Amino acid sequence: MNMKEKISIVKIGGNIVDNPEALQAFLADFRELEGRKVLVHGGGVLASKMARQLGIETKMVEGRRITDEETIRVVTMVYAGWINKSIVARLQQVGCNALGLSGADANAIPSVRRSPVPIDFGFVGDPDPSKINAPFIAQLVDNGIVPVFCAITHDGQGSLLNTNADTIAYSVATALSAHFETTLFYCFEKEGVLRDVNDPTSLIPTMRQDECDALKQQGIIADGMIPKLDNSFRAISQGVSKVMILHAKNLLSGKGTLLTGSQSKE
């Protein structure tokens, strides 16, 4: 087997999606990223705003959204519709031949609906990297097309599922690492993993799994950063070459936190 081609899986957070100027600047940079690439985008605040306008109340349990039947309709309309196609149109504008997809299209990202016990989160699912239609995604990128995935997947039983976009990015990167040398980029509104969330100069430039565990125990890494890092190290343990967590404006410079394989226990 000769050298694998390189591919970049880039996840863009909802905060960037919500900011038209930041999104435009990011997409111009994304276009310049060399080689094969896939974009995964979060949802931002528009779905909650639309739900409110339609008089659908957001139900929360333990700080997590319940995706009931009315809600899955709205998030699908917003994520797979307006946001996904707006990003595709803007990529076409900058000369990047993008194709907008949900996980249901071409059975690209089948997911398992979460068990209703102990809490029924409704139409929410988790993808299984081994079930992802990697040959289809590979075929697209090999033909110069850039897949743009929203955070909607399906269960194979006819239901659409709301899915965490970070997890989709990890799953797609993991599945594609059998075919390509894969780099996963998590782009959001912070400089990377910070020792002090309020100090952008406290960037941690590189991190191993054991260092991450130590920082978690000290409470330095908390909240929304934990699932990002868990997904990142899981991706590395499953064949992804490297993971970068960085500010969306630093996609091309690569300034951020580089995660590498564990030096200590497996």
Image: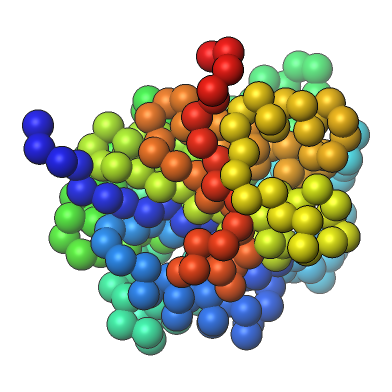
**Seen in the image, is 58 located left or right of residue 250?**
right
Foreground: 145 or 176? 176
Task: Identify the residue at the far top of this view.
Answer: 265
What residue is drawn where x is 50% and y is 44%? 243
Left or right, 189 with reference to 112: right
Q: Position of residue 175 (x, y in %)?
A: 36, 34
Which quadrant of the rendered structure holds the N terminus? top left
Q: Position of residue 170 (x, y in %)?
A: 50, 39
Q: Position of residue 231 (x, y in %)?
A: 58, 35
Judged left or right of residue 111, residue 99 is: left
Colour scheme of the rendered structure? rainbow
Q: Nearer the viewer, residue 36 or 58?
A: 36
Where does residue 181 sit, x and y in percent of width and height? Answer: 29, 42
The residue drawn where x is 78% and y is 33% is 215
Residue at image position (78%, 63%) is 200
On the question of residue 189 being in view, the answer is: yes
